[in-house]
Amino acid sequence: MSKKLRIGIIGTGGIARAHVSAYKKLDYVEIVGVADVIPGKALAFTQAEGLTEAAYFENHNDLLRLDLDGVSICTPNVSHHVTTVDSLRAGKNVLLEKPMSVTLQEGIDMTQAAKESGKMLTLGFQPRYDPNMKLLQTIVQSGRLGNVYYVETGGGRRRGMPGGTFISQALAGAGAMADIGCYSLDMALNTLGYPRPLTVSAFTSNHFGTNARYHPEASKFEVEDFGIAMVRFENDLVLQFKISWAMHMDTLGPTMFLGTDAGLKVMPAGSGPWSGVWDGSVGSITLFHDEFGGHTSTPIPIVEHKLNLFDQKVHDFAEAVRDGRPAPIPGDQILIQQAIIDGVLRSASARREVSVELPC
């Protein structure tokens, strides 16, 4: 492609600044337009980010009338559906921030729009670009563990509750499960090759978010700050999924893959009250196995790197658009975890196991 890629930005919150920063590092990309529903915000964003040549709009459909190769969608969760569907139907490739959508049906609509338009819908899960996440996938899919029958994933912050749109049921759809739980699910499911889920049995609570001792917006807190689920998959695989925005504990433990020949324990990187979830990197990897009739364990060397994972995901999207490659993290794959989160919320509400609903 000889001409520059023409990119638009929909939504101008904090995450949009990271997208702009990443795009600016690519000499074959130009940001030609920005949209935000709040009057004056798109203009202020273009000025603050030095996008002097970019057009600005209060309606994303006005932006979509421009000649664009792709858009980054950085809006609150509740807007992901309409902006994504409109963008795809307008013939634009889409890089969408997580989580995918508020409801499962919205996610289904979005993947269908991608198929019908022939355009790319990719999701912004930057931890996948950590070389150590790729190493986990290589180890598990090599068969070294044998038949993987149990996986435990998730994590918890001792204190790490957001506010604003994140705690509104109408705007976010879910709390910790969707916000940071989606990273934990993607880490495990991508490592396993995204198996098909069958049922979910779950429990959720919001003891911390609704308590003014722990959250300044307790009276507005409508979503879960803790959740745990047992997910059954095809081929007799089960996954325990747990997540917490706040708790009186230092950790919810490592991610584990138990196989018939070996097991793998993975610790997250970082420390402190906001750490302990899989939105970052890998702290350590240990293989547990038997050798010569005895139990042993082998530390797997961590791949040291200085990659900016956020930049990597934006650059991969831009390169995929430029080179005509498929979506790096396709929407129809992430729809599987959206179905699991939907099942978690339905199961917790019904207080019983529920079937996971996926389109054929």
Image (cartoon, rainbow, N blue to C red):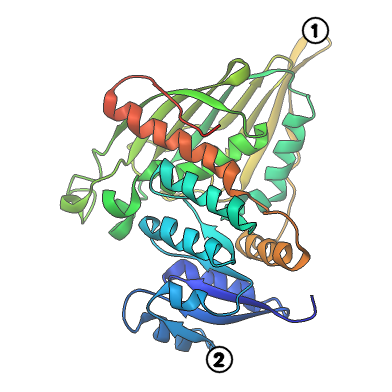
Q: Nearer the viewer, mark 1 or mark 2?
A: 2
* Residue nearest the viewer, comparing 82 with 165: 82
Residue 261, given in percent of the width and then of the height, sits at: 74, 16
| Quadrant of the rendered image containing residue 351 | top left
- Image quadrant occupied by the N terminus: bottom right
* Residue nearest the viewer, comparing 287 with 243: 243
Residue 219, given in percent of the width and then of the height, sits at: 15, 51
Image vertical order of residue 244 relative to residue 131, above or below: above
The answer for how far apart the CA atoms under marks 1 and 2 are is 69 Å
* Residue nearest the viewer, comparing 122 with 61: 61
Q: Is residue 225 left or right of residue 92?
A: left
Can you identify the residue that label 1 sits on?
293
Could you tell me which residue is drawn at 46 percent across and 41 percent down?
181
| Residue 52 visible in the current orientation | yes
Could you tell me which residue is drawn at 18 percent across and 48 percent down?
213
Tag 2, which secondary structure? Answer: loop
Res. 53 mark: 2
The amino acid pointed to by label 1 is Gly
| Quadrant of the rendered image containing residue 148 | top right
* Residue nearest the viewer, comparing 96 with 256: 96
Image vertical order of residue 51 relative to residue 162, above or below: below
| Residue 276 visible in the current orientation | no
Q: Residues within 10 Å of mark 1 (few under 14, many from 20)?
A: few
